[in-house]
């Protein structure tokens, strides 16, 4: 069996460091909002080259807190992509605002800036691009649109820690960016965790307040907030993972390059595109297949795990039925939900495993191109 993702080798690599860190926290007597969290925030700020970072409970909370901190709520519209994990749009709905979907680019599967312009109304408050699968969205173009129309930009960078565009890290373009440290994310921890980064002190201050019951002084509350903090155990583990993230991301890029080289020649297979000046960190490696379901069945038969991201675009989800989106509204997102298949990708996928996966796909022949 070749698993889709295997955390074991990276956990093994970091085990001694991790055990020391866990011991340290265990004995410290501080488990929420202590020195590990503070130090992680400092270290991640340095890594991303951004002035403010706030650890929070998870990536979804990060998005909700970001929207709340910008006072986005009922009556407001936020333009986003229908081709993402549900949490992106869920956060917008959670604060009472309306997610306005627009179709994606056929090559990167990220939100298409040309469609953003057409969707702007008087109610539009923000744009929420997602760096899908680890490829940065066209942030330069999106920031220009935002500036022209005085809109906020919240980057959903939950799949793209360490990715970059024009040598600038994903998550440092917009007003706010959100990261997730869910265990299978490219920078993951052993539980839930999330992060918000921003260039604006006022937003950072508000989010610090909001994540902790609207309070800066114990038992004194300035506003109604949340209970959403990155705990000390997760922060201690993340401080270690952060020192390995560049190596892990480089492994992903090397593995992607080998997949690309062997698979792009095959008729009926599209390999992931990397735009000029973009660094893709391949949180997921998805093939674009004429005959997706046949390839998926073939891989499963050979005990190779694979996954569909995402089988139903958000505008067609039952939860958004009342919005009245019909099939055909966003043809590219709908097509990609039928043609993309993610194959095993993690920093420790072995050469041997990769060769097996490539051989099975190469042997697919007619099954792939029909
Ligand atoms: C994982 C993910 C989230 C949510 O993160 P959690 O930590 O699981 O809450 C949000 N958006 C995208 C694009 C994600 O991949």
Image (cartoon, rainbow, N blue to C red):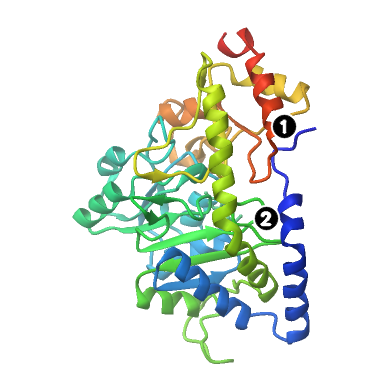
Give the vertical position of 306 relative to 290 (above or below): below
Q: How many marks?
A: 2
Q: Nearer the viewer, mark 2 or mark 1?
A: 1
Pick the quarter of the image with the N terminus. top right
Q: Is mark 2 within 8 Å of ligand 1?
A: no
Q: Residue 151 falls in which quadrant of the image?
A: bottom left
| Mark carried by residue 183 | 2
Residue at 45% x, 47% y is 131
Instruction: State the residue in front, 169 or 227.
Output: 169
Pick the quarter of the image with the C terminus. top right
The secondary structure type at the circle numbered 1 is: helix
Instruction: State the residue in front, 249 or 65.
Output: 249
| Mark carried by residue 352 | 1
Q: Is residue 290 left or right of residue 11?
A: left
Q: Is residue 65 visible?
A: no
Q: Is residue 12 visible?
A: yes
Give x and y (percent) for residue 214: 51, 81
The secondary structure type at the circle numbered 2 is: loop
């Amino acid at each position: 069996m070749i698993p889709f993702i295997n955390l074991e080798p990276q956990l093994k690599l970091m085990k001694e460091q991790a055990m020391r860190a866990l011991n340290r926290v265990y004995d410290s007597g501080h488990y929420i909002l202590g020195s590990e969290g503070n130090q992680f925030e400092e270290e991640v700020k340095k890594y991303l080259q951004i002035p403010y970072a706030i650890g929070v409970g998870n990536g979804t909370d990060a998005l909700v807190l970001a929207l709340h901190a910008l006072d986005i709520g009922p009556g407001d519209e936020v333009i986003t992509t229908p081709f993402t994990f549900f949490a992106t749009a869920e956060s917008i709905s959670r604060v009472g605002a309306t997610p306005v979907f627009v179709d994606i680019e056929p090559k990167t599967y990220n939100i298409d800036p040309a469609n953003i312009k057409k969707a702007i109304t008087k109610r539009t408050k923000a744009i929420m691009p997602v760096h899908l699968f680890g490829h940065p969205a066209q942030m330069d173009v999106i920031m220009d649109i935002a500036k022209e129309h005085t809109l906020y930009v919240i980057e959903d960078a939950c799949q793209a820690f360490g990715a970059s565009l024009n040598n600038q890290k994903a998550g440092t373009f917009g007003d706010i960016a959100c990261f997730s440290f869910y265990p299978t994310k490219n920078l993951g921890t052993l539980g839930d965790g999330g992060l918000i980064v921003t260039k604006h002190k006022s937003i950072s201050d508000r989010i610090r307040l909001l994540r902790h019951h609207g309070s800066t002084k114990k038992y004194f509350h300035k506003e109604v907030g949340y209970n959403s903090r990155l705990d000390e155990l997760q922060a201690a583990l993340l401080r270690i993972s952060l020192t390995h993230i560049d190596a892990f991301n480089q492994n992903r890029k090397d593995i992607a390059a080998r997949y690309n080289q062997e698979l792009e020649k095959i008729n009926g297979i599209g390999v992931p595109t990397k735009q000029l000046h973009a660094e893709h960190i391949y949180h997921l490696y998805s093939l674009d297949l004429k005959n997706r379901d046949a390839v998926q069945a073939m891989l499963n038969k050979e005990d190779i795990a694979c996954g569909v991201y995402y089988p139903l675009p958000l505008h067609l989800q039952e939860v958004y039925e009342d919005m009245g989106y019909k099939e055909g509204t966003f043809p590219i997102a709908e097509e990609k939900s039928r043609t993309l298949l993610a194959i095993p990708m993690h920093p420790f996928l072995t050469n041997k495993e990769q060769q097996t996966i490539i051989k099975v796909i190469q042997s697919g022949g007619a099954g792939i191109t029909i």
